[in-house]
Image (tube, grey):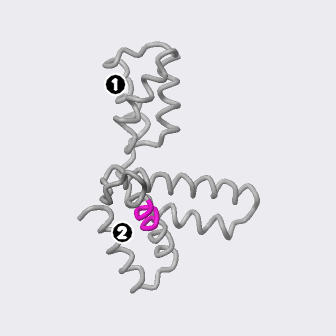
Amino acid sequence: MNLSDQINADIKAAMLAKEKGKLDALRAVKSAFLLAGTEKGSSGELAEADAIKIIQKLVKQRKESLGIFVEQNREDLAEVEKEQIAILEVYLPAQMGDDELKDGLTKLLSDIGASTSADIGKAMGASMKAFGSKAESQRIAAVVKELLK
């Protein structure tokens, strides 16, 4: 079962269980999938990697909103965002730990020959291809910058 089918099945289950928070989060994902499938140049089918990127984008948006709500002391809205983040993260691949990410990036950087800060552009492109679905882009960028000092 691909990710899109899993989301649809979980929407039905959330409707039957009357889980409003889960239903809202999953409907947002389904909406984003439908928009991506109807974009110009799209074949209508959504690849698994693209689906993961969409969910990562939705999680990132919710984390940004969470930060704003916490900053403005809106705990009621912050709780909603926390709940939706937890629901969406279930559909993402397991995230790499810091040590595992650093080891993987060290090997990748030596493979592509990146050794100075001038190579950051080349290193980030290769790093995002290799680890983009397993770690957040901000974490990858921080580790790459640290390794290429």
Picture coordinates of residue 139, whole percent (x, y): 50, 37
Residue at 36 percent of width and 28 percent of height: 103
Left or right of 96 in this view: 136: right
Residue at 52 percent of width and 24 percent of height: 145
* Residue 110 found in image quarter: top left
Which of label 2 and label 1 is nearer to you?
A: 2
Which residue is identified by label 1? 108
Region of the chain picked out in magenta, as a range: 29-35
- Above or below, comparing residue 124 to residue 42 in the picture: above
Picture coordinates of residue 88, whole percent (x, y): 45, 62
**Local SS, label 1:** helix
Left or right of 68 in this view: 6: left
Picture coordinates of residue 140, whole percent (x, y): 47, 34
- For the stretch drawn in magenta, the main secondary structure is helix
- Above or below, comparing residue 21 to residue 64 in the picture: below
- The kind of residue on which mark 1 rests is Leu
Label 1 neighbourhood size at 10 Å, few (<14), some (14-19), many (20+)?
some
Residue 7: numbered disc: 2
Q: Residue furthest front?
A: 40
Residue at 52 percent of width and 75 percent of height: 21
Label 2 neighbourhood size at 10 Å, few (<14), some (14-19), many (20+)?
some
Is 11 part of what is drawn in magenta? no
**Local SS, label 2:** helix
Left or right of 1 in this view: 118: right
